[in-house]
Image (tube, rainbow, N blue to C red):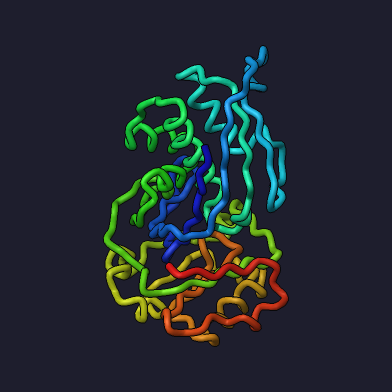
Amino acid sequence: MITFPNAKINLGLNIVEKRPDGYHNLETVFYPIPLEDALEIHTLNHQSEKNENKCILKQSGIKISGNPETNLVVKAYRLLDEQFHLPPVEFHLFKHIPSGAGLGGGSADAASTLKLLNDKFELELTYEELEEFAGRLGADCAFFISNSPVYAEGIGNIFFPITLSLKDYQIIIIKPDIFVSTREAFAKITPRHPERSLKEIIRLPVEQWKETMVNDFEASVFSAFPAIGEIKEELYRQGALYASMSGSGSSVFGIFPLNVELPKTAFKEEKAIFRFNL
């Protein structure tokens, strides 16, 4: 069996307050985009004597740093294996979504693993139960279970479905060869309650988002990495209706009308450029 975990972008991101547990409450909108990994599963014919070897992960595509044993795909398998005593499996993950880009690639892989295991082994888990398992793996993992636009609160784990379609637009995503530490990005944030709620802003026409919607991470990230801010400025020069960093970065996206040709020469120095109709 094979599935194709897709990425997301953040439409606006406000850090509203620091919590007693050290995390931050925020508000944002998650919107799925057709930038995909590929995740395939095979049942192994032998039973491993060691539980940690029941799940083998093979990776290709974009190189993923770190030990495969700590990958969210393996963690998702082990989470369900604790309850359902799953057969040993081998995953092959082809990575196309850049890591450390604010696009949720790891979370998407985790959620897709849960859904893949549920289907392959007929676990009969409901969407609500899958979301509960996904929530144990990461704040935004549960979003990828239903995989439809939501307004998110809390630490990015409390979802409210919204009616939003960007099918009449196209998007370009630029991922510079820059790593932004999420921990450091949060450390430089001064939480504040926005004057205008994102719930209200997201209902406005896309053409009005530029003047009303913000990502609170941009000020500190652009200060530390001016090249990321320059990408956003260039997207607006090229005709974007709305441009923003996604999450805590480092990718930047621009939303364009369908009848506008997306820029092809302005970002030659960037290694990762993705263009899609939404």
**Considering only vertical position in the picture, is 120 above or below 171?**
above
Q: How many marks?
A: 0
**Considering only vertical position in the picture, is 14 above or below 109?**
below
Visible residue check, residue 184: no
State the image coordinates of residue 251 (x, y, percent, origin top left): 58, 65
Relative placement, left or right, of 156 versus 181 is: left
Query: In front: 134, or 26?
Result: 134
The residue lying at 50 percent from left, 55 percent from top is 7
State the image coordinates of residue 184 (x, y, percent, origin top left): 62, 55
State the image coordinates of residue 70 (x, y, percent, origin top left): 64, 35
The residue lying at 29 percent from left, 51 percent from top is 160
The residue lying at 27 percent from left, 69 percent from top is 203
Visible residue check, residue 253: yes
The residue lying at 48 percent from left, 46 percent from top is 23
**Considering only vertical position in the picture, is 164 above or below 40?**
below
Quadrant of the image occupied by residue 210: bottom left
State the image coordinates of residue 155 (x, y, percent, origin top left): 43, 48
Relative placement, left or right, of 47 versus 67 is: left
* Viewport quadrant of the C terminus: bottom left
The single residue placed furthest to the top in the displayed view is: 49
Query: In front: 226, or 52?
Result: 52
